[in-house]
Amino acid sequence: MIKCITASEAAALIRDRDMLMVGGNGGSGVPEAVLEAIERRFLAGAGPHDLTLFHVTGVGAVHEKGLCRLAYPEMVRRVIGGNYGMQVPFMKLIRGNRIEAYNFPQGVMTQLCRAMAGRQPGLVTHVGLRTYVDPRQDGGRMNERTTEPMVELLHLAGRECLFYRAPGEPNVAIIRGTSADEDGYVSMEHEATAREDLSIAQAVHNAGGIVICQVKRIVQRGSVNPHMIKIPGFLIDYFVVEPDQMQTYTTQYDPARSGETRLPKSRIVPDPLTVRRVIARRAAFELRLNDVVNLGVGVSAMIPNVAAEEGIEDLMTLTVESGVIGGVPGHTREFGTAVNPRAILDQAYQFDFYDGGGLTCAFLSFAQVDAQGNVNVTRFGERYDGSGGFINITQNSKRLVFSGSLTGGALDIDVRDGELQIRRDGAFDKFMPQVEQVSFSADLARERGQEVSFVTDRAVFHLEHDGLVLTEIAPGVRLKEDVLDRVGFAVRVSDSLTLMDPRIFRAGPMNLRDTLVPRAGATS
């Protein structure tokens, strides 16, 4: 029989200086009850202290919940994470040099879980070369306090590779599922993502640590189909039953996100026609028939809503790095999940596919772009977000579409009468002579023959051998004052400069399906 304990009892099992591995993906699959109990115990003065925290991606609701509950410098001494954008309290600790912090690509982090499960010394991969995780740059260290090298440059079989060291012996795992039977076998039928919880459980179990799993319910022995079991019972030491655990931070339970039902397309309401919607609509013009696509956070995550309005989501396969394939991926706090998914894989397998070059196209955001075409999304100004899946995706996709506003800060742009109206431009430029940190290497993209474009609110650029070339401009926008003067370096203007399609700036469907279907031969 399994051993059920309270969340408070689970929190009491964590000792000072433990290495803690926590599951979850954004706002889905988060063992919230246990994390809340850990914070409550710490604030009561009972510890734990000096933890090493390992998490694959951002887990939280930006300023609260999730791993935000552990963001105390006396509690966590070192954090190794794939992203901090959903954990602003941790971002502040990192920026203030109050804790040691590493950031590695999300795919590397999930694959490291598998390596640790197999008691391997680490992971060898090409992912991260010529970016800030390369030891010739920052080695993935996020602040001055972080000094220990954890990434090495290797030469194997005539190739440059990076070796990411496994970060030590994990002591405690905190993961989540839906149901546990009386022998502890865990299924995830109400989960919107499967994550890497199995690998985390294996890694901690094989290291002699404690595995804690939060579930909604206990069911009869053997009542769950073996194909539905995600984690065998012998890997788990303790269960915390939380009947009210939410599917995501905004959804108690939506069966269309876990694949139990399908939501009619008519129920997916188009987003309002804002300037961000304009960017997503223009980016959607880069979709091709039979594409297998990744969609990143920010503006790019709004593209599935455009695809649903256009009725083209069935003409290509939209994927998210969390392991979700097909359907209509969500954005904001639903990012990482999808309505009507066709498959939900463990995250590491999704990144195996990405790293091997399986994606035909990827849509991602940018924070800074420089004269060479390098992109920074990881550390800029007061933001210490880290990469998430950005590096895995950008280094291996055949085509890349970066999306975002041309300028940033206090923008006031209206979409009216089929054109843009810039009432107040941004306070700072995003296109600058040199980025603060290299998250995407333009030179590496050129060497690999990747097709790269930048879609903004008012202009479209393409990456060429000599830098960026301006190819399109939005109706209502002035070429010199609104575009060229807001780019911090010389940009070549194409001889065939055109206006962006006027359909983008008018509410209602753009009839993209009619333009996609005739291009049956264009699959890459």
Image (spheres, grey):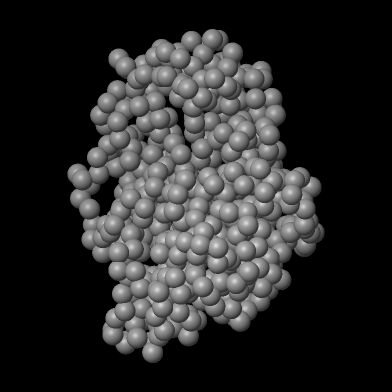
The part of the image, by quadrant, that contains residue 442 is top right
Residue 496 position in % (x across, y down): 52, 17
Q: What is the total number of numbered labels drawn onto the structure image?
A: 0
Is residue 57 depicted above or below 480 in this figure?
Answer: below
Image spot of residue 277 (x, y percent): 37, 31
Direction from residue 415 to residue 296 in the image, left or right: right
The residue positioned 66% from the left and 58% from the top of the image is 78
Can I make out residue 343 in this image? no
Instruction: State the image coordinates of residue 409 (x, y, percent, origin top left).
Output: 51, 24
Give the percent coordinates (x, y) of residue 475. 40, 15
Residue drawn at the location 51% of the way across and 13% of the way down: 482
- Compared with 433, 223 (above or below) is below
Residue 486 seen: yes
- At horizontal 40% and vertical 74% (from top left) the residue drawn is 6
In the image, what residue occupies the spot 69% across and 69% down? 168
In the picture, the quarter occupied by the N terminus is bottom left
- Asked whether 224 or 36 is in front, the reply is 36
Q: Nearer the viewer, residue 116 or 253?
A: 253
Q: Which residue in the rendered view is the most extreme toward the front? A: 45
| Residue 349 position (above or below residue 239) | above
Query: Hey, which residue is sitting farthest bottom in the picture?
Result: 1
* Horizontal arrangement in the rendering, residue 221 relative to residue 385 (left or right): left
